[in-house]
Amino acid sequence: MDASTGPEMIPVQAGQVTLSDRRTRRSWAVELDPYQLATYPITQELYAHVTGERPSTARGDRLPVEGVSWWDAIQFCNALSQRKGFTPAYRQVGGEGIEWDVSADGYRLPTEAEWEHACRAGTAGPRYGSLDEIAWHRGNSVETIHEVGVKRPNLWGFHDMLGNVWEWCWDIYDAEVYGAYRVLRGGGWFDEHWSCRASVRRRSHPTFRVDDVGFRIARSVVR
């Protein structure tokens, strides 16, 4: 992984995933087009290379960037797209509105359906392996963040989908109840084992920043 060349991306074929929410006891199926997803959460090295900033509490080039809001992640995606000569996926409308140009080839946040589909990697259980082998969580992290790519990847090659840092997704969680709150997935280094599952959904305001929330990025396969 080299900050000058950008993130490693893995192609994901079209498919279907069923999402669920414990709060509302609702489940729904989502059809997915092909896309690419980053092998790891965005590191502090890459974030600093693109933005010139190091917002994280813990410091280390290969640590996931944390202390970043959903807005920070959106701005990073556009900045990296421009550096690589891609069309930015996002444009600001009004004061706080963001539109996603689905025809753009630039970097973006995954939808939560894309995130869960890649996390599961064809498996049906709560996790894609033994938790201690695949994730940093409260039981094994010594209550600190860890470098990306240390734990075993899933069958499709994705590392740290569970544990280490929660990951921002594009989606609004529940507009009627929580307004602009966005979806977080994956669990973090301070979470108990029950939060580190493929189906778990969390939400927060798009300006929220904390030391166990980061993100990874996706790209659409533009035809």
Image: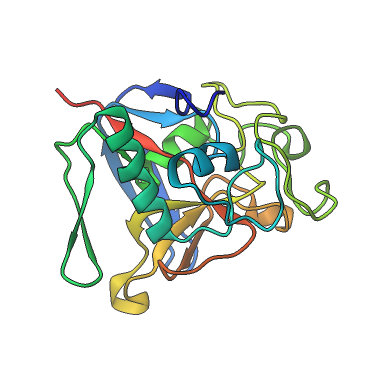
**Left or right: 28 in relation to 90:** right
Residue 150 placement: quadrant = top right
**Left or right: 201 in relation to 210:** left
Taking the spot 61% from the left edge, 50% from the top edge, the residue there is 165
**Left or right: 65 in relation to 52:** right
Q: Position of residue 223 (x, y in %)?
A: 14, 22
22 or 77, which is in the foreground? 77
* Residue 109 makes an appearance in the image: no
Q: Classify 2 as above or below 179.
A: above
Exactly how many numbered labels are in the figure?
A: 0
Q: Check the image and tell me how it is coloured.
A: rainbow
Q: Where is residue 92 in the image (x, y as percent from the top left)?
A: 20, 60
Taking the spot 81% from the left edge, 55% from the top edge, the residue there is 143
* Residue 141 makes an appearance in the image: yes
Q: Classify 191 as above or below 46.
A: below
Q: Position of residue 164 (x, y in %)?
A: 67, 46
Taking the spot 41% from the left edge, 31% from the top edge, the residue there is 37
208 or 201, which is in the foreground? 208
41 or 185, which is in the foreground? 41
53 or 195, which is in the foreground? 53
Residue 103 placement: quadrant = top left
> Where the N terminus falls, by quadrant?
top right
Q: Classify 105 as above or below 60.
A: above
Q: Where is residue 195 in the image (x, y as percent from the top left)?
A: 64, 56
Taking the spot 62% from the left edge, 37% from the top edge, the residue there is 160
